């Protein structure tokens, strides 16, 4: 008898002797899902957004500038609905996700209570979370990209190249806009207040950059 079959037989005996019924019967009652912010965040979000909301592969959330930038209603909406076509899933039960309305409130309130802080905008205007009426200019965006981003985002640079269609296919305009405004202070990317050669990027600059990058996503 092979070793594998031998251990399978032993396993069946152990199961029978222990009186378990591995098939057919419902398992033990479902563990109550934790209601405190730290646990909810750790169990559902930190895999992508980092331990304590920083340093993960996905966007930094534990950041004063980010929480000043995103209105509470938008924060709630993106958690409830997720972002279609990206790795960000929908969390609300009404959207097919696992969390109750109450648990989402704990997350939203917890992020604001624990992570929001007063930020010094150093005289720069805080851009609106969602892009407004400004129309982006792709050519100008290309120039700004080479001037303000390329030093870090070139192939082989300290950060990943952003003009790769494979990267752009999995992200959204809003995520690009958010990244340009907020940066990645946990990973060494500066924010909009200084990205224009030490000075703030304007609404027009941000729109141009996003339009340029999204154009790369479309062109195969
Ligand atoms: C001083 C270096 C530096 C500069 C300048 C810089 N970045 Fe970054 N950027 C980074 C690093 C580091 C990361 C995080 C690692 C990564 O995603 O590759 C990052 C990440 C990003 C991300 C992904 C963020 C996320 O969390 O999903 C976007 C989008 C981005 N940068 C856009 C830009 C744009 C547009 C510019 C120019 C306006 C720019 N960056 C300028 C260093 C830089
Ligand atoms: C499997 C990975 C993954 C998990 C788990 C995840 N996220 Fe995300 N999240 C993402 C990605 C990727 C994005 C960027 C989506 C895009 O490109 O627009 C994102 C975006 C977001 C944004 C919006 C960022 C912006 O543009 O302003 C918020 C807020 C957010 N996530 C919160 C959460 C919370 C809270 C949880 C836990 C309940 C969570 N995420 C779990 C991957 C994830």
Image (cartoon, rainbow, N blue to C red):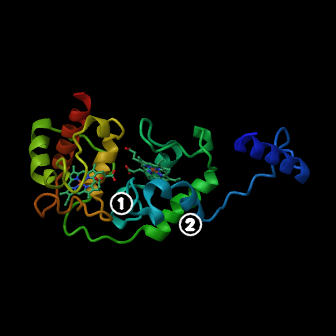
Side of 169 where 190 appears, left or right: left
Q: Position of residue 96 (x, y in %)?
A: 60, 38
Kindly identify the residue that appears in the image at 26 percent across and 64 percent down. 188
Kindly identify the residue that appears in the image at 24 percent across and 44 percent down. 162
In this rendering, which labeled residue sits more in front, label 2 or label 1?
Answer: 2
For the residue carrying disc 1, how many other residues have a C-alpha within 10 Å: few (<14), some (14-19), or many (20+)? Answer: many
Comparing 32 with 220, the one in front is 220
For the residue carrying disc 2, how many other residues have a C-alpha within 10 Å: few (<14), some (14-19), or many (20+)? Answer: some
Side of 159 where 102 appears, left or right: right
Residue 74: numbered disc: none
Q: Quadrant of residue 37?
A: bottom right
Residue 163 visible within the image: yes
Q: Is residue 176 above or below residue 54?
A: above
Q: Position of residue 197 (x, y in %)?
A: 10, 60
Comparing 164 with 77, the one in front is 164
Q: Would the CB of label 1 be found within 8 Å of ligand 2?
A: yes
Task: From the image, tell me which residue sits under label 2.
Answer: 38
Q: Would the CB of label 2 be found within 8 Å of ligand 2?
A: no
Task: Tell me the element at label 1.
Answer: helix
Residue 135 visible within the image: no
Residue furthest front as drawn: 1
Q: Position of residue 17 (x, y in %)?
A: 90, 51
- Using the numbered discs, state the Cα–Cα distance from disc 2 to disc 1 in whole angstroms: 19 Å
Kindly identify the residue that appears in the image at 16 percent across and 46 percent down. 204
Side of 29 where 16 appears, left or right: right
Task: From the image, tell me which residue sits under label 1.
Answer: 66
User: Where's the C terminus, which quadrant?
Assistant: top left
Q: Is residue 119 above or below residue 96?
A: below
First in sequence: mark 2 or mark 1?
2
Q: Is residue 178 above or below residue 61?
A: above
Q: Position of residue 90 (x, y in %)?
A: 53, 43
């Amino acid at each position: 008898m092979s070793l594998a079959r031998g251990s399978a037989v032993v396993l069946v005996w152990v199961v029978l002797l222990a009186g378990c019924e591995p098939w057919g019967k419902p398992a033990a009652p479902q563990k109550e899902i934790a209601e405190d912010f730290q646990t909810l965040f750790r169990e559902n979000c930190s895999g992508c957004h980092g331990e304590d909301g920083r340093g993960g592969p996905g966007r930094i959330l534990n950041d004063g500038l980010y929480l000043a930038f995103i209105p509470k209603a938008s924060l709630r909406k993106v958690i409830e609905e997720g972002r279609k076509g990206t790795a960000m899933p929908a969390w609300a039960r009404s959207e097919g996700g696992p969390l109750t309305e109450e648990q989402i409130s704990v997350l939203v309130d917890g992020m604001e209570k624990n992570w929001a802080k007063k930020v010094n905008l150093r005289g720069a205007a805080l851009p609106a979370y969602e892009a407004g009426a400004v129309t982006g200019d792709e050519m100008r965006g290309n120039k700004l990209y080479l001037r303000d981003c390329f030093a870090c985002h070139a192939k082989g640079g300290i950060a990943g190249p952003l003009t790769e269609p494979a990267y752009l296919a999995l992200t959204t305009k809003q995520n690009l806009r958010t990244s340009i405004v907020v940066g990645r202070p946990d990973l060494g990317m500066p924010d909009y207040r200084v990205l224009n050669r030490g000075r703030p990027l304007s609404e027009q600059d941000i729109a141009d950059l996003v339009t340029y990058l999204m154009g790369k996503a479309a062109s195969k």
